[in-house]
Image (cartoon, grey):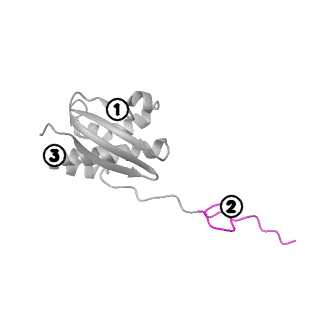
């Protein structure tokens, strides 16, 4: 295990997470705010910590995350992917566990564009015969 900082990128929908992982005491900082402050919902904090919990390494790394774009759930899942990728760079043996839990896969679903002549991506204006 090295002492330098490992940085990776995680994405989900419109959210981008730039993740910096270094050995430490388990402190997670997002946009210069503590995790508990940035994500007040317990479920979102759990989503961010999932790769660490799967490996049992919650107290071994200090993580600094720059989040941009998207909504809260997309940001949490982008951070999860970034952390999982960083852990794989630190130790390749973690990859099988993280992959088995589904943390290494980038969710490809994106918002479908709105088409002209209709109110949304798939919704149509109400048809009137008369």
Magenta residues span 114-130
Q: CA distance from mark 1 to mark 2?
A: 40 Å
Residue at disc 3, secondary structure? loop
Magenta run includes residue 120: yes
**Residue 124: percent from left, percent from top:** 69, 65
Residue toward you, 76 or 56: 76
Q: As displayed, is residue 87 above or below residue 31?
A: below
Residue 86's image quarter?
top left
Looking at the image, residue 114 sits to the left or right of residue 104; the answer is right
Q: Quadrant of the C terminus?
A: bottom right
- Label 2 vs 3, first from the N-terminus: 3
Residue toward you, 40 or 113: 113
Looking at the image, residue 63 sits to the left or right of residue 111; the answer is left
Q: CA distance from mark 1 to mark 3?
A: 22 Å
**Residue 23: percent from left, percent from top:** 19, 34
- Label 1 vs 3, first from the N-terminus: 1
Say how many tags the image has. 3
Residue 68's image quarter?
top left
- Label 1 vs 2, first from the N-terminus: 1
Q: As displayed, is residue 14 above or below residue 4?
A: below
Residue at disc 1, secondary structure? strand
Residue pointed to by mark 2: 119
Residue pointed to by mark 3: 91
Q: Quadrant of the N terminus?
A: top left
Give neighbour class at mark 1: few <14, some 14-19, many 20+ (Cα, 10 Å).
some
Q: Which of pointers 1 and 2 indicates the residue nearer the eye?
A: 1
Decide: marks 2, 3 in contact (CB < 8 A)?
no
Residue pointed to by mark 1: 29
Looking at the image, residue 18 sits to the left or right of residue 25; the answer is right
């Amino acid at each position: 295990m090295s002492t330098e900082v490992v940085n990776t990128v995680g994405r989900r929908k419109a959210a981008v997470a730039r993740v910096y992982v270094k050995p430490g005491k388990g402190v997670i900082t997002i946009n210069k705010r503590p995790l508990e402050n940035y994500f007040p919902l317990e479920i979102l904090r759990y989503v961010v910590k999932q790769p660490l919990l799967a490996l049992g390494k919650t107290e071994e790394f200090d993580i600094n995350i720059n989040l941009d774009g998207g909504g809260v759930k997309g940001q949490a899942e982008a951070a999860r992917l970034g952390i999982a990728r960083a852990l794989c760079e630190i130790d390749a043996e973690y990859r099988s566990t993280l992959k088995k839990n589904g943390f290494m896969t980038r969710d490809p679903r994106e918002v479908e564009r709105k088409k002209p002549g209709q109110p949304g991506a798939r919704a149509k204006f109400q048809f009137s015969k008369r």
